[in-house]
Every structure is written in structure tokens, then in C-alpha cells.
Image: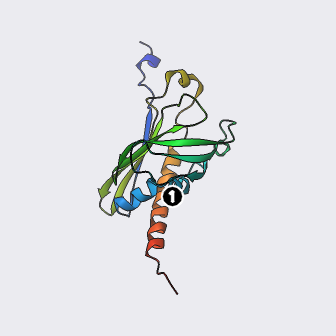
Amino acid sequence: MTALEDAAPAAERIEVTRVIPAAPHEVFAVLRDPQGHVDIDASGMLMDAEGAPVSAVGDRFLVHMDREALGDLPMGKYDVEVVITAYEPDREIAWTIEGTIRPPLRHVYGYRLEPADGGTRVTSYCDWSDLREDYRPFLTFPIVPESALKGTLGILDRTVRRRARAGSAPTGA
């Protein structure tokens, strides 16, 4: 056996975790909201979203993208549909993407939420283990780097706090 044959297979999933000082339902409210995805995106690709907050596996919403933010492929602006693949309120939400590439790539993004001292332990993940074999020679994964997943968790923290403050702001004159 050569050293190359001995090497472990490349990881096909990345995960990052952060404790956010909020209740799971507050975090989940942002994650189920199409505009919430745009609000917390650290990759710079998500420009806007259309659709109602999701509530079940199979729900979909539209996201307007700009791949130029990554500078890796000359795709420019395009639209994708987010298709919910896991939905457990206040515990987990995951989705795949249907977009310009047909058939779809079958990579999955998601969040797991667990109660923790001081708030909610949020794990963001990207899993490309089910990526179509015929696409593997042409694509580099992860598309969104681990640093962007970490950045998104920081923005999620800020967004949850801002939404909580906005919801508790006094109304009227």
C-alpha cells in the first residue's frame, strides 16, 4: 500500500458550533424564515428570498443568489429553490438546493439546536456525502467554507438578539 492508499477519505461534512444566548424557539424562528437565511448569510451569495416561513419537510422558498461573491465560478446572479429535508421545531432544520444545475447536486445544509447553559448550542453543517458521483470531478466542496459557516453563526447570534429587541420594543406614542 502506498501512503496515498493509506490516507483516510476526505471529509464530506463540516460542522461548526456556537452557543447563542437565546432560547431555541428564538433561534429557530430566524432559521425557518426565508429572509432570515439572507439576514445571516456570511458567504455574501444570498441576495434576497421570497416565500413564507417553512413548517414541514418538503416546504420550499426561493433565494436570489450572486455567485460572484465567492469568485469561484462565473455564474453571476441566479435563483435557487431551498427544499426543506429535515424539520423538527426548535431542534433541527436542513435543506438541499434545486437550482440551475440539473439534476440537483444533493448537498445539504442545516442547523441542529440543543438547549445549553446560557442559551442554545447551535451546530451549522454542510454535508456533501450524497453528492452525485458524476459531479464530483467538476466541483470543489465545500462550496461555502468553514469560515463562512462560523461567520454565519456570529451573524445569527446578532440577528436573534436584534429580533428579540425589536419584538420587545414599546409601541405607540
In this view, the residue farthest toward the bottom is 173
Q: Residue at x 49, y 68 (%)?
A: 162
Number of numbered tags placed on the structure image: 1
Is 135 rendered above or below residue 160? Answer: above
Q: Quadrant of the N terminus?
A: top left
- Name the spot of residue 104 as percent of width and height, x first: 53, 31
Foreground residue among 163 and 87: 87
The residue under the point 55% across, 24% down is 135
The color scheme shown is rainbow
**Extreme top residue here?**
1
Q: Amino acid at mark 1?
A: Ile
Towards the viewer: 122 or 172: 172
Q: Which residue is mark 1?
A: 155
Compared to residue 129, the image places residue 57 above or below, namely: below
Image coordinates for residue 63, horizontal then vertical, percent: 57, 47
In this orientation, which residue lies closer to the viewer: 86 or 134?
A: 86
Residue 114 shown left or right of residue 138 in the figure? left
Residue 29 appears in the picture as rendered? yes
Q: Is residue 145 visible?
A: no
Quadrant of the image occupied by residue 118: bottom left
**Secondary element at tag 1:** helix
Left or right relative to 134: residue 117: left
In the displayed structure, would residue 72 be above or below residue 112? above
Which residue occupies 52% across, 87% down? Answer: 173
Viewer-proximal residue, 168 or 172?
A: 172
Q: Position of residue 110 (x, y in %)?
A: 43, 44
Measured as percent of width and height from the top left, residue 158 is found at 49, 63
Residue ID at (44%, 32%):
12
**Side of 67 where 155 appears, left or right:** left
Callout 1 crowding tier (Cα within 10 Å): few <14, some 14–19, many ≥20: some
